[in-house]
Amino acid sequence: MQSSGLDGEADGEEDFSKVLLGMMEQLTNKDILYEPMKELDDKFPEWMEKNAEKVGDADLIRYREQQVYVREIVQRFESKTYTDETEADKEYIVERMQKMQAAGSPPVDLVGDMAKAQEIFGAAQDGCPMQ
C-alpha cells in the first residue's frame, strides 16, 4: 500500500510546531526576559503620558494593549509562585508574548533599536542549529 505523503507532511508540521514552541519557551524564561520586560514596564507609563497626543488613535490603542501585556508578564514573573518549570506559567508568558507580537512593534523611541533584544534572540538562535 502506498502512502499519499500527506501524513508525512502533517507529522513534519507537527514536529516543526513542537520545535518552535520549545524555542519560544526557552526565549520566554525569566532569566532572559524579565529584565527587558521590567525596563519596558517602567518606561511605558511616562512614554504614554508624553506621547499619547502625538501618535494616531490606532497606534495609541495598540501601545496601550502592549503596555497591558508587558505589565501582565512582569507581574507573573514577580509572583512568588512563578517558576519557569510550571506549565501554566510557561503558557501564560508565551501567550502574552504572542499577543504582544501580534499587536505590532512597541514605540521605537521607547525601545530604541532593540539591540539588547536582538542580542538575546541572536544568542538563542546560535544555540539552535539550522535544519
Image (cartoon, rainbow, N blue to C red):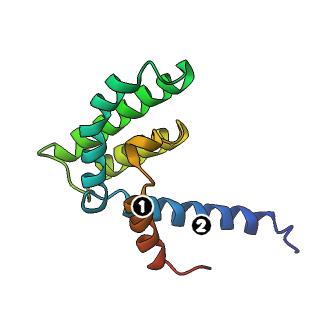
Which residue shows up at 44% across the image and 30% down it?
63
62 shown above or below 12: above
Q: Amino acid at mark 2?
A: Asp
Crowding at dot 2, Cα within 10 Å, few <14 / some 14-19 / many 20+, comes out as few
Residue 76 appears anywhere in the view: yes
Q: Position of residue 100 (x, y in %)?
A: 46, 40
The C terminus sits in image quarter: bottom right
- Quarter assignment of residue 102: top right
User: Which residue is at the far left?
Assistant: 80
How many numbered marks does the figure carry? 2
Residue 95 appears anywhere in the view: no
56 shown above or below 101: above
Crowding at dot 1, Cα within 10 Å, few <14 / some 14-19 / many 20+, comes out as few
Q: Position of residue 8 (x, y in %)?
A: 74, 69
Dot placed on the residue nearer the N-terminal end, 1 or 2: 2
**Which residue is identified by label 1?**
115
Q: Position of residue 37 (x, y in %)?
A: 30, 47
104 shown above or below 82: above
Q: Position of residue 26 (x, y in %)?
A: 38, 64
Mark 1 lies on a secondary structure that is helix
Which residue shows up at 86% across the image and 67% down it?
4
Q: Amino acid at mark 1?
A: Ala
